[in-house]
Image (tube, rainbow, N blue to C red):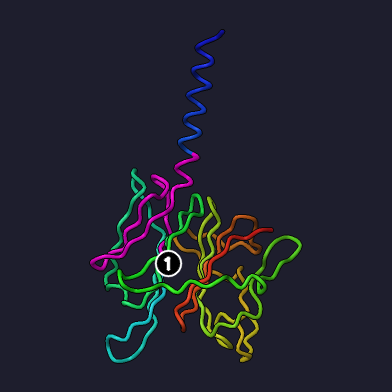
Amino acid sequence: MNFGRAACVLAAGLLFSVAASAADVPLQLTIRDGAVAVSNATPGGNVVLFASGLDGSFGVLSQRRLAQNLPADAAGSLVYKPKRPLPYRTICVAVDVETGRMALGGAADYEIQVRPFPVETLKHESDGVSGLAGAEIPRADLLVVRPKGGAWRLAASEGDSGDDDRQHDGKLALDFSTAVSIGAEVPAPKRLKNKDVVVLIDSARLEVFTTEIVQ
């Protein structure tokens, strides 16, 4: 028996198991003392922080948004502190760009409203998913992440900017190809493919919908 070869095969198998297990560890996101902390990300990989909130601190309700593509350290962790703390009523999302793993979070005592993604609104074409049509959402913040590929964002208001049909019909239509890159200047994909991640935040009601494309 060739023990050297057997040892190499065993070592390779162990390394594969460790890598596979690391990819399965849930991403963690916490907000504390005005900072957003992420752990269990891919070591040295990028993490997208995406947030939408409502700020009434100055007597007028205003929308606050965050979109950052940040590197994790060798331990798979990062801490980001915005110049202004995020409002109490904020939905924050972290996505590991390498794997597509996702975590949702908010203030310690703020309950995030997670809703089933309206998959019936996805526009399936022969070569992928091109966008959304007929989403009953007045205002939306959209995040698209292609694992190992990049991240893009799009903000839209019903019947106004970002609404692809520009009709005041109570429904949003979104064209994924018009999204803007977060970080590196990479054009948005015209069609979403298998394993692409979509995060949709209703920025008026502060509800979040997430899905992974199956195409």
Percent x, y for residue 210?
A: 53, 66
Q: Is residue 113 visible?
A: yes
Question: Foreground residue, 129 or 12?
Answer: 12
Question: Foreground residue, 74 or 24?
Answer: 24
Q: Residue at x 44, y 79 (%)?
A: 206
The image shows a total of numbered marks equal to 1
Residue identifier under label 1: 50
- Magenta extent: 20-49
**Relative to residue 134, is residue 39 depicted above or below?**
above
Q: Which quarter shows the C terminus?
A: bottom right
Q: Residue at x 65, y 81 (%)?
A: 134
Percent x, y for residue 111?
A: 38, 73
Percent x, y for residue 152?
A: 51, 64
As for residue 137 lying within the magenta part, the answer is no
As for residue 43 lying within the magenta part, the answer is yes
**Relative to residue 174, is residue 45 depicted above or below?**
above
**In-image side of 67 versus 157 (left or right):** left
Question: Foreground residue, 71 or 52?
Answer: 52
Percent x, y for residue 97?
A: 48, 54
**Could you say which quadrant of the image residue 168 lies in?**
bottom right
